[in-house]
């Protein structure tokens, strides 16, 4: 995916209908995808570090999805399963989950550990962008 073009308007090649920005969290499956996303995205990227066995992570998932839908085109939301990609959790010293880390231009600008409802997630993003 061309993450550096996320601010652009895209149109269907066939019918020329405007296509919407991603309104669901991007599921990051590797270090390579993660690096491409955070370093090349034209939009700020909020990453949720989580694990499938984590109760608070399961509670945050629908709230995170709501924020992705509400902020499509202004922010990119991504999820990193720390069980599938433990190298990213180690690299960013994620000691508690869920942990949300906000990136802009490839750099970490803020982080917050713990479960949050959608309004708190939006506030966290907005106060650091």
Image (cartoon, rainbow, N blue to C red):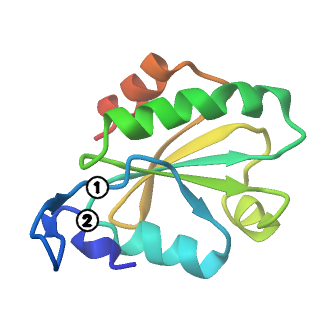
Q: Give the residue at mark 2.
A: 6
User: From this viewpoint, is residue 121 visible?
Assistant: yes
> 65 or 125, which lies in front?
65
User: From this viewpoint, is residue 113 visible?
Assistant: no
In the image, 101: left or right of 114? left
> 13 or 23, which lies in front?
13
Residue at position x 84%, y 28% in the image: 55
- Under circle 1, the secondary element is loop
Residue at position x 25%, y 46% in the image: 74
- Under circle 2, the secondary element is loop
> 41 or 17, which lies in front?
17
In the image, 129: left or right of 39? left
Residue sticking out furthest to the right: 53
State how far apart marks 2 and 1 are (Cα).
Answer: 7 Å
Q: Where is residue 125 in the image (x, y as percent from the top left)?
A: 38, 35
Q: Give the residue at mark 1.
A: 21
Q: Where is residue 29 in the image (x, y as percent from the top left)?
A: 67, 70
Q: Where is residue 120 in the image (x, y as percent from the top left)?
A: 47, 19
Asked whether disc 2 touches disc 1, contact meaning CB atoms under 8 Å apart, the reply is yes
- Image vertical order of residue 104 relative to residue 52, above or below: below
- Image vertical order of residue 43 relative to residue 3, above or below: above
The image quadrant of residue 41 is bottom left
Which disc, if any, is residue 124?
none
Give the position of the C terminus as an image quadrant: top left
């Amino acid at each position: 995916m061309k993450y550096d073009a996320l601010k652009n308007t895209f149109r269907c090649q066939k019918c020329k209908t405007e296509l919407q920005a991603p309104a669901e969290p991007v599921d990051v499956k590797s270090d390579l995808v993660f690096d491409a996303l955070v370093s090349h995205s034209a939009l700020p990227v909020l990453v949720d570090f989580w694990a499938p066995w984590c109760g608070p992570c399961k509670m945050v998932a629908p709230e995170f999805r709501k924020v992705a839908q509400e902020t499509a085109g202004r922010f990119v939301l991504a999820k990193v399963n720390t069980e599938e990609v433990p190298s990213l959790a180690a690299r960013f010293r994620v000691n508690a989950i869920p942990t949300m880390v906000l990136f802009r231009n490839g750099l970490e600008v803020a982080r917050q550990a713990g479960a949050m409802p959608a309004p708190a997630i939006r506030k966290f993003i907005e106060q650091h962008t």
